[in-house]
Structures are given as C-alpha cells and as structure tokens.
Image (cartoon, helix red, strand yellow):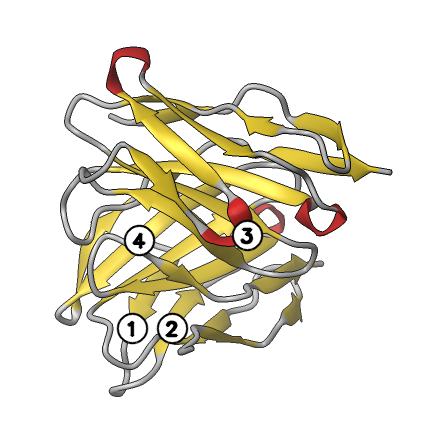
Amino acid sequence: AQSVTQLGSHVSVSEGALVLLRCNYSSSVPPYLFWYVQYPNQGLQLLLKYTSAATLVKGINGFEAEFKKSETSFHLTKPSAHMSDAAEYFCAVSTTGTASKLTFGTGTRLQVTL
Amino acid sequence: EPEVTQTPSHQVTQMGQEVILRCVPISNHLYFYWYRQILGQKVEFLVSFYNNEISEKSEIFDDQFSVERPDGSNFTLKIRSTKLEDSAMYFCASSLGPTQHFGDGTRLSIL
C-alpha cells in the first residue's frame, strides 16, 4: 500500500519569500511522485513529476522538487512566491505501472501575503 | 493543449435518484479514471478503466457505481441510487502513460 503525508494543511508566506511545501511518502515499491495544484473551482493541474529519471525535477511556474529516497520525501519549493501562487497543492504517489492509481495527500493551502 | 472535459459542472439530484457524470478524455489517451473529493477531504481514487474494462477499483466503488465508455469519446460514471454521502466533487482523468490529466470536475450535490 502507498500513502502520502503532507505536513501543514495551511502555509502562509510573504510575496517574494521562499515557498516550501512538504511531502513524505510511503511505498513498498519504487514510486512515481507528482505535485498537482488546484485553483478555486478548477481541476487538478500537474506542476511536476518524478518518474525515476533525474531526482531534481523542475516544473511549471518556477516550482521544483527533489526526490530523496533516504528521507522518503518529495518537497516542493519555489525561490520567490507570487500572489498568483495562492492555491491548494497536492502531493501524490503511484506505482511505476502505466495505469496505476494516484494516492493523494490531504493537501496544503498556500496563502501569499503582501 | 488538449483537455479533459467534464459535464455538467454542477449536478443537483434527489437522494435515491440515478445520476450520470460525463467525461470526454484526451483523444489519444488509453487509460481513464474517476476520483472524488468530499468537501474538505483529500482526493480519493474510485476506478481505473482500460481496454473497455475496469483495471482497478477502490472500496468506495461498490455495486451502486458503474463506468462505461459508450462510444469512442465519452467516459461515464453512473451512480445507481444516490445517497447523501455521495455529495462530492468528481474528477475524471485520462493518461497515455504515468501522468494523469484531470478535468475541472463535476460538483454533485445530493438533497
């Protein structure tokens, strides 16, 4: 079985500050890992993914994440927050099968203040 | 960029009624999924579908639920007799490989 833990249901940062959203996973097999973003009244948009290539993954909107097997982590970072980054962020894990289900964390709501 | 489209965006139904949620996956994708998100909770997997049959289903996906790909473009989720606890946002997703692309969801409200 797989699971994801996202520490911090709400994170607040100032505009221009570093964004760090934490994700730890549990998986009995090598995982694929994903970060999705959800803006109000919208669906889930893929930010970035780790599928067993480079451990440092760059995504859209300046976000990146690093897969650390020893720490079972896949934390999401962005050097400088923008007001438009305010949204809900979900970390998800799947197995390496092609049509494997996604198991999501509980999400982190990011607030960006002036 | 191709999108997954879901209709309707909001469905209101009386308890005990049947409801069909519709999805048009990305045209060249082969794998299809339904997820749901109860208000304030995390996104949960319901079912995956490939080659006209269910690949995997969760405990939530009981006999009240069914999925169908009636033609080459649509993918539907049917709830036979809705309960209050079926109220949630339902997301359709499709994929060609490991990356799943999601629609904007259908908000289902059971009265």
Q: Which residue carries the number 3 mark?
A: A61
* Mark carried by residue B68: 1
Residue at the spot x=69%, y=27% of the render?
A11
CA gap, disc 1 and disc 3: 36 Å
Q: Nearer the viewer, mark 3 or mark 4?
A: 3
Q: Name the side, left or right, on which A88 lies relative to A25.
A: right
How far apart marks 4 and 1 lie (CA) works out to: 11 Å
Cα distance in 3D space between marks 1 and 2: 5 Å
Q: Nearer the viewer, mark 1 or mark 3?
A: 3
- Measuring from the top left, give residue B49's x and y in whole percent: 23, 62
Q: Chain of mark 1?
A: B
Q: Amino acid at mark 3?
A: Asn
Chain on which label 4 sits? B
Give the crowd class for mark 1: few <14, some 14-19, many >=20 residues within 10 Å.
some
Q: Vertically, is A39 above or below A114?
A: below
| Disc 4 crowd, CA 10 A, few/some/many (<14, 14-19, 20+) | many
Distance of mark 3 from mark 2, alpha carbons? 33 Å
Residue holding disc 2: B76
